[in-house]
Amino acid sequence: MLDRLLRLYRNAYSGLPRRVWYLSIILLINRSGAMVIPFLTVYLTASRGYSAAKASWVMVAFGLGGVVGNYVGGLLNDRFGSWHIQLFSLISSGLIFLLLGYTNDYLLFCVVIFSLSVAADSFRPANRAAVAIYSPPEVLTKAYGLQRMAVNLGFSLGPMLGGLIVTAISYRALFWADGITCLLSGLAFILLLPKDETARPLVPKSAEISVSTTLNPGHKSSVAGHRQFWLVLVCLANLLVATCFFQLFNTVPVYLEKTGYSLLQIGYIFTLSGTLIVAFEMPLLYLTEMRYRPLQVLVIGSFLIAASYFFLPIAVFTGVAGIALFTILLTVGEMLYMPFGNTFVATHAPEARRGEYLGLLSASYSLAFVLSPLLGLNAAEWLGFDVATYLLAVGGMVGFLALAWLYRIGFRREVKRGNLVS
């Protein structure tokens, strides 16, 4: 039994290209320095004396910058190559973090935080496009899973280190630490990943068969992402599912605190989720990638995310065990949904526009991150947490149904053509 388990873990991590491991190391360094954003609202209210409303608009500016950065980063990736965009993102965001620590005017702070988010989030589509270039198709989802694991490990370290720095030194030191780790990530990027094929603009393949041709008759590889029916549908569905999922980081903690859970118990939710991801995501991706098509797994993952929020009001009143079950259900949905979403878009995008297509998907995540607290907390204030949770779960379920419909019609048309949809 133990031998089989060890073999499973070995297989889960085997076959990944060396450059994917290097990218993961760079991500780990970068995300371990993610110290400013987790403490930003506390810094703005406690240290700068801004009201909660003013602090919330700073976070909106940060979120909107992420939407712009993801889309523009995808476009620039296809124009200049992902190597240049990743390096630009790491260096520029490091410098802007240093500037942000010395920005005192409120409106200027909003402008700088927006610019920071544009620069930092332009990394995402370029990074995902680079992973798609480096990885053989049979390990692409595992490669995205490894990137996610590096991000989660980094984010688990960053806030802890940030808390120590604020306590021992000052808030300004936090901006220096975040900026320096970004610059160190840029240095590691140059040393570990010298210019290669990802430094060149992408060139379209002579022929490409994908679900995009199935759902868009007359499809050409030069078609912009926003004109692709299948991609627009996936991004809209993702907006609904991700808005539902991101309640974990804003509405859920408040919901639990209002119903009598301690801060320590709330913290255990994030610890449990992070532990599950680090321990089980790679083996889970290995097993599912061998047996199912990406869109199938995307459908299953979206259902689990929506279903977990239908269960949340029940879990809240059943105690810690119920909350643990909610967290497990949500995290399994996350582990299936997010890596396979990247795989599905990356493998069906025209190669010359892969960055743009991945950028649109990433932008829908950033927009969901902005909408999530606005919708969740305001709905909870007006309707109560139970009703708000059910409404957002319905939104997630609509996203699931859209993806299920996409899979169904794509599958039927490909069967008629004698192919299979991925």
Image (spheres, helix red, strand yellow):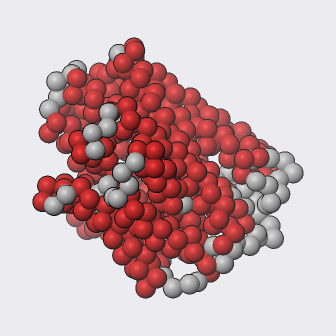
Q: Is residue 355 left or right of residue 291?
A: right
**Identity of the residue drawn at 27% across and 29% down:** 254
Left or right of residue 58, residue 195 in this image: right
Q: Position of residue 422 (x, y in %)?
A: 64, 53
Q: Position of residue 372 (x, y in %)?
A: 45, 34
Q: Residue at x 21, y 37 (%)?
A: 266
- Residue 16 x %, y %: 45, 74
**Is 280 rendered above or below residue 43?**
below
How many marks do you count on the picture? Answer: 0
> Looking at the figure, which quarter contains the N terminus?
bottom left
Residue in the picture at 76% in, 59% down: 209
Residue 398 in view in this figure? yes
Residue 257 occupies quadrant? top left
Q: Nearer the viewer, residue 336 or 55?
A: 55
Q: Nearer the viewer, residue 271 or 370?
A: 370
Residue at the outermost top position: 383
